Image: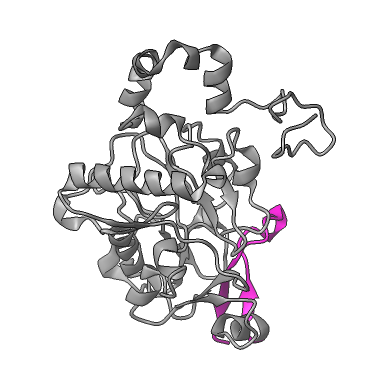
Amino acid sequence: MHGDNCQCSGTKCNSSGENPGQMNRRSFLRKSGLMASGIAAIAASLAPLRELKDMTSVEEFLQKHYQELTPEQMSKALDRITREVERQYSIRPHVRDLKPMDGVEFVYALNLTRCIGCRKCVHACVAENNQSRSPEIQYIRVLKMPNGTFDMEKGDHNYAPESVPEKGFFYMPVQCHQCHNPPCVKVCPVNATWQEKDGITVIDYDWCIGCRYCEAACPYWARRFNFTKPSIPKDQINPDMAYLGNRPRQQGVMEKCHFCIQRTRAGRYPACLEVCPTGARKFGNILDPNSEVSYILKNKRVFVLKEDVGTLPRFFYYFDV
């Protein structure tokens, strides 16, 4: 008989409800016999991994997948994150587990007629989402594109910002497109990344093993990997945090744009939108027929990048004319 939580859908599984072809961190520990050796033995065995991922505790490594956490377990996880942020940055953060709202599917629309390539969105994103400053990790890549082409490979993201806007070019910001058919989710071997019902593809940083398969699968170059321990000055940490959003990440994990989940699921706009000086960025609920993004998708010249790869992005580009 399968367990109550079995999701085998007709495939063979063992008595615990797991597909024998799948392996995650907890099943590895259980099957290897480490649990029987006691917490001290586990701590010793995890010492090299702690060096790799800057892990704070055995508790973090053994934590269940986000989607399996009970409210009590989530409360303990949030308390652990709060303590760790206090230890590292000497501030007490407000860490929340914000769930998707019913009847909401977020989409982004970006007006290429108005974007001037100033990169203010890039830096607002870094500040809001507690990204490493040294080396600086940026979720948004702004490409200077020759007029008449939408080939990302022909874009230049190393242009001098003081030269914008430059005649003969337009500017195209690229970030996670929150695809309806995300290839990054399909390749993750431990289910550390998945798509939620409001359209946002998220990452459980505690579950990520840093294999970078998702980075290779993304056609938009949207995933970032922490090769070194992230560095954020204490006076620049944003204390308003979400478990699946902008809480500080450790070395050896993937991260990316998540539509500022700590803001948008609380009824606010993404930081990149608020800082845009030309109003080029629009964000909202596509399920609301009266929303601005619904109007744009119905009435503007709208397109998506790399339509041929079948990712069905929720990030759209358009022109005024």
Q: Which stretch did the figure color magenta?
A: 299-321
Could you tell me residue 240's position as x and y percent?
A: 30, 61
Would you place residue 200 above or below residue 162 in this image?
Answer: above
Could you tell me residue 210's position as x and y percent?
A: 46, 33
Q: Quadrant of residue 100?
A: bottom right
Q: Quadrant of residue 253?
A: top left
Q: In percent of the image, x 54 and y 27: which residue is there?
A: 26
The type of colouring in the image is one colour
Q: In percent of the image, x 43 and y 38: which residue is there?
A: 206
Pick the front one: 102 or 119 = 102
Residue 206 belongs to magenta span? no
Q: Quadrant of residue 288?
A: bottom right
Farthest right residue in view? 10
Total labels: the figure holds 0
Q: In percent of the image, x 50 and y 35: which residue is there?
A: 212
Would you place residue 109 above or below residue 25 in this image?
Answer: below
Can the viewer see residue 221?
no
Pick the front one: 5 or 12 = 5
Q: Quadrant of the N terminus?
A: top right
Q: In percent of the image, x 58 and y 87: which residue is there?
A: 321
Image side of residue 172 versus residue 184, left or right: left
Image side of residue 61 versus residue 28, left or right: left
Can the viewer see residue 257?
yes
Would you place residue 16 above or below residue 223 in this image?
Answer: above
Could you tell me residue 233's position as x and y percent?
A: 17, 50
Could you tell me residue 215's position as x and y percent?
A: 52, 41
Pick the front one: 188 or 204 = 204
